Amino acid sequence: MIEVVNNILVQIDAEGNMISIDDKYQQLYLNMQKILGDKCSLEYEAGAREVEDIYYYLVEKIYELPTYAWDAEFKDGPKQKLNSAFNKFIHNKILWKTQEPYWNNYFSDAKNLRQSNGKFLV
Amino acid sequence: MIDLKDVQNNYLAIDFFLSMSCNKDCHYCTSYTLEQRNLTVDMEFLKRTLYYLRNYKTRCNILGGEPGLIKNLPEVIEEIKSNPNHVCEVLSNSTVRRRYPKVLTDPDIIYVEHFILDFYEHEITYLGPRSYEFHQENDMNNYNLVIKTPNFEKYKHLYPEEMKKLDNKNTLWKEFNGRSPNFSEIQLNPQAAEIDRKMCAAFPMVPVINFENQNLVHCSKKFANNAITSKEFEITQENVDKMMNFRLFKYENYCVTCTEYVQPKGHFPLKKYASILLE
């Protein structure tokens, strides 16, 4: 899972070890904090909420181009959706090698395949 | 009086392709036919479309084809201007200046003119009469639009006087065929980054309302090039609402393979998205 310690993102593995996370994700987190303010929360479950494609694109764009996040003021509804998209993005990116986010059909399909023939086909 | 910066920052642009007919055949243009057809706009369709857009800040770009050929253009412009949420922009090859000069004196209409066809070693070729001058710096919202063609990059240094005349706030510079920032970098095949194409797909550079077929077209580039038919939608209140809230257009197959130039910074600043998402 991913947690915030001293305003820094860290990954906690199954044995409770803290693993540092790439600076680009730290930058994304800071940018999202700037845009979302107190609506910015890091929750695994928040990513399960489906939102319109545009929110995923905005998060990806802010990740690719941090300066894109300059002084934009979203209303409350879009903020919550942006937060969901952010959670899905960051959990998918960071946990992708270690865990399989349950909301992602792509992963659940792969899981079914693995269970059926004993191989991980991704 | 309207302010171009305000319009660029706060309004969503939609192209109104009134007719594909044009009286010129510029080498860089893909959206015209010399056949003179559909020169009278169906006002019932226009009124219905504008009614669906009534609550959205919309920049209605009148083009085609050549809008100067439209017989009831003043009526069309008046209809667009009747809603304070709508801004009317006319893009012409100078036919509007000749036929409907009142458009130029109205500061509430953004008038953009492609007056220069191209630059050559011995002359600059113009689309209109030589007696027409470039628009000087003005507050009437009349703009020169200069396309940075390969010849522009090659020969602009030969015309310092003209370049000086164009060097003002009323000149807009457009990239050649929208593909590349300048001639030396023209490459037809490389693609923009996937995320830029996705954002472009969500609300394309400008969606099109096609007055000939009376429908809504996802992408003007694919519509004009006709390489792959761009996705079309019926004009209904539901579709317009979805479009203006970024829910109608998806990342299509032709977006996956698109090689048009897409702004790396996203063609919408984040501030603009924030102001448009209404919920």
Image (tube, coloured by chain):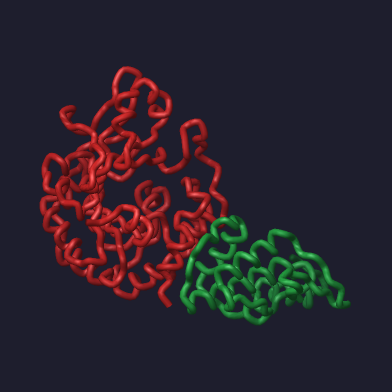
Chain colours: A green, B red
Snapshot quadrant of residue B76: bottom left
Q: Position of residue B126 (x, y in %)?
A: 24, 30
Which residue occupies 47% across, 39% down? B181
Q: Most extreme residue toward the top, as rendered?
A: B122
A71 and A80: which is toward the camera: A71
In x, y percent, where is residue A23?
72, 59
Q: Is residue B188 above or below residue B50?
A: above
Hey, which quadrant is residue B161 in on the image?
top left
Q: Quadrant of residue A80?
A: bottom right
Asked whether, in this view, residue B11 is left or right of residue B256, the answer is left
Question: Which of the two residues, B126 or A111, is positioned nearer the viewer here?
Answer: B126
Q: Name the residue at 59% across, 78% down.
A: A38
Q: Is residue B27 above or below residue B106?
A: above
Residue B201 is at least partly visible in this image = yes
Q: Residue at x 35, y 73 (%)?
A: B241
Residue A113 visible in the displayed image: no
Question: Which quadrant of the rendered structure holds the C terminus of chain A?
Answer: bottom right
Q: How many marks?
A: 0
Foreground residue, B103 or B161?
A: B161
